[in-house]
Amino acid sequence: MPQKQSSSVLENNTCASAKPTAASSLQTWLQYLEHLHTSAIDLGLDRVKAVGVNAGLLNPAPKVITVAGTNGKGSTCAMLEAILMDAGYCVGVYSSPHLVRYNERVRINGKELEDADHAGAFNEVEAARGAISLSLFEFGTLAALSLFKSNNVDVVILEVGLGGRLDATNIVDSDVAVITSLAVDHVDWLGDDIEKIGFEKAGIFRSGRPAVCGQPTPPASVAAHADDIGAELYQVGYQFTYEQEGEHWDWHSGTFDLPNLPVPSLPLPNAATAVMVLGLVGLDISDENIVRGLKNVRLAGRMEKVSEKPEVILDVAHNPHSAAYLAEQLRRRVNGSGKQNVHAVIAMLHDKDIGGTIKALKPVVDSWYPASLVGPRAANASELAGFLPEGTASFDTPEAAFDAAVSQAGEADIVIVCGSFYTVGQVSNYLKVQKNRGE
């Protein structure tokens, strides 16, 4: 299985710039950290765990929930966060990647922290790492744990960055581990075998502790690993079930039922998984907390409606699995609200399944606006155009593609922006700049 690991815990860093201080700006820190390590992705726990031990960060809160999965991690974390906050708990969430600002990666009670808070946490990790080299994600993970610990949060929710077993978040022993969904993605790092991917994600399970899987019929490796280590597996379709009826849904686990729950703005399968997690985490959570949390939860970039006439929706769907869910949501919108045409602004990374993602969206999209991204992993618009109808115009940037889509869309149409966190982030920032200018 493809994976890149460091050969040693101690590594010389020859390309990092001068060390920032606690008084340095967040941007200075991020520029420093981008060049600190030899690889942007470097799976393995030896280095990051050694620093975590040095800094005393392996127990950041009384309760920890770790969430892995191909899709649905962010929405599951957001629903857990909303319900726990409604129950009166102080909740810290660590997620990635961000859409516009690095600050989005750490929330405490639903709020982003100031630049100075992140700079101070980075400074603490820098002091603790000594000669140990860390990637930006590893450094950020430790900084987030430091922020949660210093703010005395009651519950920490950790979103796995990549895989699970060797992800930096896995240095913490969670009270409940979660797999939201499983599909082939990140093949350069996790391989293209779904059984191997299942094993990697199940690596966050812990002996004698609950593990929740929201993927129907997951690969056998998930249950096998749970059995091997003695984790208590709760599988959708077996230990818990759910069904939707109109604007409400029912959740069941054994003899316990939660009827007539509100349908959240985020995917229902992830809501059902989140409810199971909350039943296992050992905290005082009422039915009313669950209802209010589901009603109030929102998450940027997930079926996020940002304007009307035309209706503009931002969604970070970036692989066939998430694109199929997005297509179904768009189909319901068109059929249920009298909407007419769907215009898709799409830009992707070249290491994603571009053809499969576009294929999943094709049945509901009327007009395409492919755009190029910038960076070593970026796909050119021409790569996307190869999977689109002949004569489809290409655009240099997502912003240009978005302007074209809006200009062509009627008031009753939908404009969807999708394909990558980068795509949604760029358009989201573009819209905010326009709003600030009064355009």
Image (cartoon, rainbow, N blue to C red):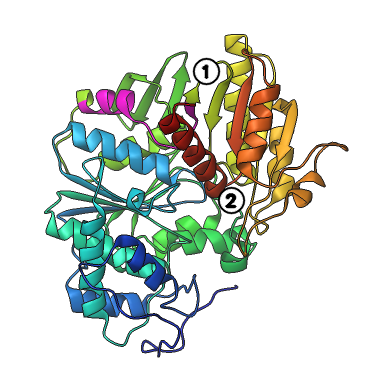
Q: On the image, numbered disc 1 is attached to which residue?
A: 308
Q: Residue furthest top?
A: 338
| SS label for mark 1 | loop
| Near-viewer residue (394 or 173) | 394
Is 370 placed above or below 8 here?
A: above
108 left or right, relative to 266: left
Position in image of residue 165 (x %, y %): 42, 67
On the picture, is 409 further left or further right than 147? right
Q: Measuring from the top left, give residue 117's x and y in whole percent.
A: 21, 57
The earlier-in-sequence mark between 1 and 2 is: 2
Give me the residue at 40% from left, 22% from top. Answer: 263
Residue that carries the numbered disc 2 in the rendered image = 183
Which image quarter is the N terminus in? bottom right
Q: Is residue 18 above or below residue 171?
A: below
What x and y, as percent, mark residue 298?
37, 31
In the image shown, does 14 or 164 lie closer to the viewer?
14
Whole-angstrom CA distance, mark 1 to mark 2, is 33 Å
Report the residue at 57% width, 26% height from top: 329
* Residue 239 visible to an observer of this rendering: no
296 inside magenta stretch: yes
Give the magenta part as a residue range. Answer: 289-305
Image disc number at residue 425: none
Crowding near the residue tagged with mark 1, few <14, some 14–19, many ≥20 C-alpha atoms within 10 Å = few
Does residue 414 appear in the picture of this structure? yes
